[in-house]
Amino acid sequence: MIRRGQLFKNLPLFLAVLPQSPKYRNGKLIQKPTKEGIKRFVQTLKETIHKNQAVSTEVLIHLLNPKLTGWSNYYRHYCSKRTFGNVANKLFALLWMWAKKRHNRKGKLWIVRKYFRTKENKNWQFSTKVANKKGKVEWLDLVDISHTPIRRHVKIKGDATPFDPAYEEYFWIRHARRKAKRLFFPCKSQWSPWWELKFNGS
């Protein structure tokens, strides 16, 4: 039986069991990142920014984006929306301190104009201008994990197997939905040859 606030040692998840209510008669299980895991990730971002005080904005963004993308993709299947927002706020504070330390004689407005821009409905997008392979100047933005969509993981039916023709349509629909949500990546396991032959037509 899962207890309220139980922490699993082998999983970086915190489980909270909500009490019974008219909406959830049997209770509800909430999975979200642990406080220790969040603290470690923020510390990793802090160390990365601190060690690269003298690098260009482009290099710093290239160092942070893979970390932000990987961490947010790992937890996007859980109740992490509020966590993503909190981490984004802490990251903004770290970047602001990084910019002020680089330009300690400049004013706040100068720092804002140099390192931040308005993108759609966001006024504090950390970014810089870079030249692409064709020589065209474009914006390079820092990943905003607060806008990471939460995607619930849909389990495969227990009796479904890709080798059974009866479930061919089921796997086709599942593959199409994953691809539409941009959650599909080529499988690098024993399923890879079958998957490529089945869905890619190779």
Image: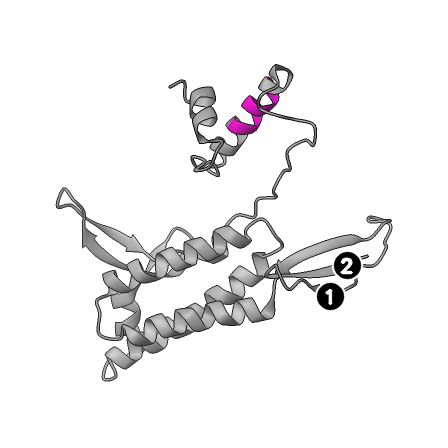
Identify the amino acid type marked 2.
Val
Q: Residue at x 47, y 20 (%)?
A: 198
Q: Is residue 50 left or right of residue 89?
A: left
| Residue for badge 2 | 17
State the image coordinates of residue 27 (x, y, percent, origin top left). 82, 53
Q: How is the image coloured?
A: one colour
Q: Which residue is nearer to you in this view: 107 or 42? A: 42
Task: Look at the image and say whether residue 19 sits in the magenta stretch.
Answer: no
Side of 191 relative to 80 (left or right): left
Q: Secondary structure at mark 2?
A: strand
Q: Main secondary structure of the magenta part?
A: helix
Image coordinates of residue 19 in percent, x first then y, are 83, 59
Does 161 appear above or below 17? Answer: above
Residue 99, percent from left and from top: 29, 74
The disc placed on residue 5 is 1
Residue extending farthest to the left is: 135
Q: Quadrant of the N terminus?
A: bottom right
State which region is magenta.
Answer: 169-175
Tell me which residue sits at (16%, 44%) in the image.
133
Name which residue lies at 46% across and 64% down. 88
Q: CA separation, marks 1 and 2?
A: 7 Å
